Structures are given as C-alpha cells and as structure tokens.
Amino acid sequence: MSGISVGVFDVAVVGLGLIGSAALRELAESGGASVVGIGPAEPADRSTWDGPFASHHDSGRITRRLDARHEWAVLASRSIEHYPRLVADSGVAFHSPTGLVFCRNDEVGIANQRDVIRRLELPVEVSTVGDDGRVGEHAFPPGWTVLSEPGPAGHIDPRALVRAQLVLAEAAGAGIHRTFVTAAARTDDGWRVTGPSVDVRAREVLFCTGPYHQGLHGHTLEATVRPEAVILGEVDETEALRLADLPSAIHLLDHPDLDDVYMNPPIRYPDGRWYLKMGGSHSGAGFLETDEAKRAWMSGDAAEDLLPTLRDVLVARLPDVEFRSFSVRPCLISDTASHLPYVGRLPDEGSWIAAGGNGHSAKSSDAIGSLAARMVLAGGWPDGELLEDAFRPRLGVWRPGEGSRHGN
C-alpha cells in the first residue's frame, strides 16, 4: 500500500477520506475498471505535517437518517443500510446504534423534518421538553421540540469506516498509495497524477479532496472552508460504562457564539482513554482561504481559545456527567452553495468531483462515494431517485450569509 507507484489505470481517486475510500471500494468492486486511490495516512505529528489535513482522523461522528433535507436523509439511509455488509466483509467494526435525540425550536426546520419523517417513514418520536428540561441525561430548554430516532442511529468511528472501505477496496483489486497528490494535469489520453512517491496515469480522475476542493482540478467552486473545533471531555471507565447507551444528540442552540452542537456518548480513543465528544458550528467563524491558512489552523493551537465556551456548553447539556478533563481539537468544515455535496463532472474531460460535506457527510459517505463511483463508470448521472441538479458542482465564488450553516 506504499512506495513508488508508476502505473496506468482507468480511474484514479484522489483523496482517501470517507468519501474517497467509499468511491474507491465501489469502483474496485464493480470489476469493470482498473482503479487506484491516492491519499495520505493520518499524520503522526500534525504540528510538523506539511501535507493536506483531514477531519476524519477522529473516533466519533453522529449517524442518523433524520434530516430537514430529503437528499441528506436518503444518502444517510442508503449508507446505514450498507453498514452491516461493510462490517461483516471487512471485519472492521465502526457502528454503534445508540440512537439520537435532536432538540430544536424553529418551526420551519421542524416542519421540514416532519416531512422527511413522513416521506421516508422514519420511526422518529416527536415530543416536547418538559419543565425539568431533561431528556434522559441531556438537558435542553423546556418547551423545545425533541425528535428521537432509535438505532441504527447513533455514532460511527470515521477512522474505522475508512479502514473498512480500504480493506474491501484492496481485496477487490484497487491500488492504494498512502501519499498526497501535488499535481494533476491533463495529457493527450487522460490525466497524470503526481506527488511524493507517486506518478500515475489514468483515463479519468475523481477528486475527493474534502476541504482542498479548490486546488488540484484548477477550477473555483462555490464553496468555502471554515475552522471548527471539537471538545473532548474525558471520563473514567466507570462513567463511560454507565453512559454506554447514551444516545447521540444534536442541539440547535440559542447562543451568542454557537449555532448548534452535536454530542457523542463516551468512546474509547486510540490513546486508551474515554472521551465524550462535542462539536459545534461557530457563528463568528471566518473562512480559510488558502492551504496555508488551513495548515495553520490544523497544526497550531488557536482552537484552544474556544475551550471555555465549548466546555461550558458541554457541561450544561450533560450536568450529571463527571468529567475528568477537557481538551480541544481543530477540524475543517467544507460548505457548498447548495448545502449538499458536489457530485458531478468538472469542465475538463475525464474530470469528476465528490466533495463538500457541509458538516453532514461522515454518516452518508458510503452512499456519496458510491454515487460518485457509479457516475464515473456510467459517464453521467446514474441515480433515479436523487436529482442531478441538486448535486451539480457550481463554478464561481460564493460566501454564505449569516446564521446557521448547517441544514440539519
């Protein structure tokens, strides 16, 4: 899976995060094309890493079918339905179906979610927060609406999900090279993709480059990248086991600094410790316009400034949890003008993209990557349920307006 690679393939997948690894697996399992995937492994030390960063180097992401957008709900449903096969065939466990509680107080969003519940026949219970403000361990504002989705909603381990996808991709014959790409250029008969220790030719290339969606393919997309931070609240093993069945949670806040937060139950991280994770959308966050700005955010300690705000919100949401310590980690969020991932053809022949997660894509990445792979193989839009125009890449410059950047 490493070393110098010089080869010729039908399709090269650039980027092996959640979407890219899923696309590579789907392409390889189709049996109709020779494929190679190129993307770096997790950096050992992010403070000295000089390549692209990714936010899936983490152990907890919410998974749910419930959403205010029909397209996101469909993508999530397809992915969740496929989880058991991925786990069984790869031998890599990544899914914990602990359920979800979603608290909000906006009539339009609630109405949209109710419509999705009806259309997809989701087993979601809608209730009102009581006067004590408690929904199990979670504390929410009295009178707000809570939508409760049982398992298979819950949480996934994104590192493990990528690992499962790559195990299956390699088993199906895909080439995998754990380095990053520095250039992709058109040739007379396709594309040349190069980087440290890699130099391949491919008839077509699929860019799954996450927050680096503006670079290698040479076009400007209506998309932005913003900094975000997550807080890890450490608990001891006794507390972790007590909270093992705690549902994941999303809360659309009435808060001066945060638009919304999401929380996972305690998860054992690679360092052996148990952390209850919370992430949030910061209403005042600016944009990271350059690769240098992204690198500075991800390799530096600026996220530490957000620790007091995140800690206060986390403790208020889970007032009975006994935390041992708190730490923060930076991440990157890619937003698109459509608030859906861009999955489609780019202007140059043989060039495709699947990127722009809008903070939603981890849970749905299997379906997004599969959709992109089927599109490349078919030479055009392959889906009869989802509309191509909703996912078509938009070229140009875009800046989102004020307010929450998550559709939810």
Image (cartoon, rainbow, N blue to C red):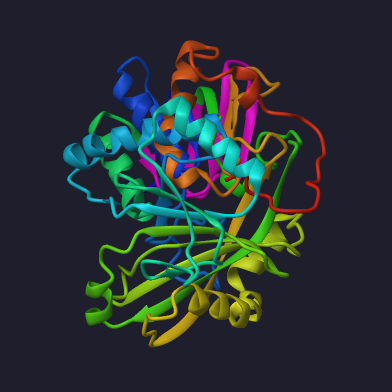
Please state which of residues 153 and 130 is positioned toward the viewer in this rendering.
Answer: 130
Work out which residue is located at the far bottom of the displayed protein and give it: 324
Tag count: 0
- Tell me if 324 is positioned left or right of 104 in this view: left
Image quadrant where one finds the C terminus: top right
Residue 188: within the magenta? yes
Q: Position of residue 49 (x, y in %)?
A: 54, 66
Quadrant of residue 90 within the rendered picture = top left
Residue at 42 percent of width and 39 percent of height: 65
Outermost residue to the front = 131
Please tell me in which quadrant of the rendered image residue 159 appears: bottom left
Relative vertical location of residue 9 with respect to residue 210 in this rendering, above or below: above
- Front residue of 196 and 303: 303
Look at 61% across and 83% down and name the residue there: 308
Between residues 15 and 301, which one lies in front from this camera angle? 301
- Residue 130: image location, x then y, percent: 47, 64
- In the image, the segment drawn in magenta is 176-201
User: If the image is split into quadrants, where does the N terminus sit?
Assistant: top left
Kindly identify the residue that appears in the image at 29 percent across and 47 percent down.
151
Residue 17 at x, y percent in the picture: 45, 46
Magenta stretch: dominant SS? strand
**Can residue 80 be seen here?**
yes
Left or right, 308 with reference to 373: right
